[in-house]
Amino acid sequence: MEIGFIYAIGAAITWGLVYAIDEKILSNITPISLLFINSIITAIIMLPFLFFSNNSVKQFLALDRANLSLVIFEVLLVMLANFLIFSGIKHLDASTASIIEIAYPFFVVLFSYIIFRSTPNIYFFLGGALVFLGSVVIIKLA
């Protein structure tokens, strides 16, 4: 099995645990508070890695204006996405929010095609549409 698949499965398992814990946390605090705490703790934990990895700093400083803009835009999108999923978990529940959010592969394929002109085959669109449709079916029947 390729290492990328192991990482992806590990991420899926980890996110499943995170969503369940987030539901419990969000019964006591607001999504914006959790996002802030999450960001602060992440920054504290990652700071030593940044200092001990000279390559990371050099790579970041070597980015051209276009890639730096993409990094900034991506960070803003991550903050918005986290806020939206925290809000979804708080107002629905972790299971329902995750089922709706799992439709994101369809949007990955769509935006990759629109923005970066990637050339996915029909199976990517078909698979993404089936995931999206499956999410709708689960929500409607649950």
Image: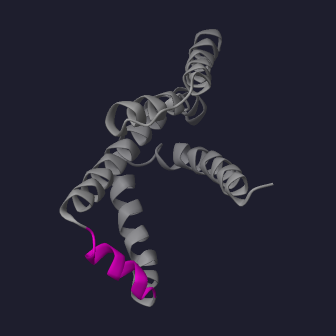
Q: Magenta stretch?
A: 53-63
From the viewer's perspective, tell me whether residue 117 is left or right of residue 94.
Answer: left
**Residue found 36% across the figure and 40% down from its top:** 116
How far from the left and from the top, in percent, is residue 107? 45, 30
Asked whether 123 or 46 is in front, the reply is: 123
| Farthest left residue in view | 65
From the viewer's perspective, tell me whether residue 77 is left or right of residue 7.
Answer: left
How far from the left and from the top, in percent, is residue 31? 37, 45
**Residue found 67% across the figure and 56% down from its top:** 4
How far from the left and from the top, in percent, is residue 32? 32, 49
| 114 is within the stretch colored magenta | no
From the viewer's perspective, tell me whether residue 46 is left or right of residue 58.
Answer: right
**Residue found 56% across the figure and 25% down from its top:** 128
Q: Considering the image in quadrants, where does the C terminus appear?
A: top right
Relative height, residue 64 to residue 122 (above, below): below
Asked whether 6 or 140 is in front, the reply is: 6
How far from the left and from the top, in percent, is residue 139? 58, 16
